[in-house]
Image (cartoon, rainbow, N blue to C red):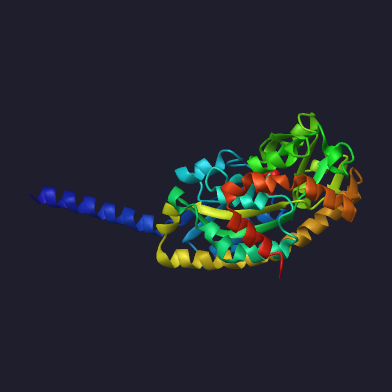
Amino acid sequence: MFKFTAKALVCALSLSLAGLAQAADPIIIKFAHVVADNTPKGQGALMFKKLAEERLPGRVKVEVYPNSSLFGDGKEMEALLLGDVQMLAPSLAKFEQYAKPVQIFDLPFLFDDMAAVDRFQQGPAGRALLASMESKNITGLAYWHNGMKVMSANKAVREPKDARGLKFRVQASAVLEEQFKVVRANPRKMSFAEVYQGLQTGVVNGTENTWSNYYSQKVHEVQKFITESDHGLIDYMVITNTTFWNGLPEDVRSELSKIMAEVSVEVNRQADELNRVAKQDIAKAGTTEIIELTPEQRAEWREAMKPVWKKFEGDIGADLIQAAQAANQN
Ligand code: LMR
């Protein structure tokens, strides 16, 4: 009897000690992304880590994995749903399997400038998209800007006809595929980590991205021309696994939400500047000619790519497209 009680006591004690140790363990948030640290998203992830660990000491630890070092395109969403990673910030082009309306952000020449993008994202329609994937266990926490896309190739591309027959790398997006098809170019879906090599080996001849993504991946070294087309957008949705997020202690979740809001303001404030400096660095590198478009040439691109809107209107929703256009009028 005594023996039994002592054994039970030891057992209960070790269980409660294990419980204490568990309570003391910080919550680990793995934040994976595909770009370099010196980009808007790279900086945002590091800022989030710094503030979370400062304000929730010992309770939260954020591990940031840049440059596809933990999961790259194609694998990261699955990893989030499996709980192998807790936060991601995929480009808005990478959500089509989960929410068709998010494809709106890929429509060419939709937003006049980043201020319009901001008005749309922070307005009711943009906020609703953040919550639109909860049934798929994905919670959108915030939008982060990168900026407007430019286009590059190994030949000078000034007018839509110059793109004919060129093979362009695109993100995994049907809208972006169509955007190049309408100018009779050949789009190729390819993950971000493969872009440099794809261009170097001639698997593709051109691509589109922001200045900061070109510079930080050295893509300009394998592209002779960049056309300052500003024809579309690369922005991000910071997402988390809904079950994970809702399971966090209330005070931790609310502090992390506050931090995310602060970081988002800062990322969105800095993004323009990071892209401006990256453009200067590319110009200084002297590897690539930067082509400016005349207003007439830009209008030609807009006209040539406009049919893409009609093709995806059914999936995206005409009302949503109207709401985005309304954001162009301040
Ligand atoms: C790309 O795949 O081209 C980019 O969107 C990568 C990124 O996250 O900026």
Q: Is residue 256 left or right of residue 91?
A: left
Q: Position of residue 165 (x, y in %)?
A: 81, 31
Q: Can residue 90 be spotted in the picture? A: no
In the rendered image of this protein, does residue 65 appear above or below residue 271?
Answer: above
**Image quarter in which the C terminus is found:** bottom right
In the rendered image of this protein, does residue 153 appear above or below residue 317?
Answer: above
Along the viewing direction, whichever of 241 and 118 lies nearer the viewer: 118
Q: Give the total of numbered labels.
A: 0
What's the residue at 46%, 63% (across, down)? Answer: 253
What is the quadrant of residue 260 in the picture? Answer: bottom right
Q: Residue furthest bottom?
A: 330
Q: Is residue 247 left or right of residue 5?
A: right
Q: Position of residue 181 (x, y in %)?
A: 73, 37
Q: Is residue 205 left or right of residue 43?
A: right
Q: Residue furthest left?
A: 1
What is the quadrant of residue 197 in the picture? Answer: top right
What's the residue at 43%, 68% (across, down)? Answer: 251
Q: Position of residue 216 (x, y in %)?
A: 76, 48
Q: Can residue 109 be spotted in the picture? A: yes
Along the viewing direction, whichever of 214 and 119 lies nearer the viewer: 119
Q: Position of residue 323 (x, y in %)?
A: 62, 62
What's the residue at 57%, 47% (across, down)? Answer: 315
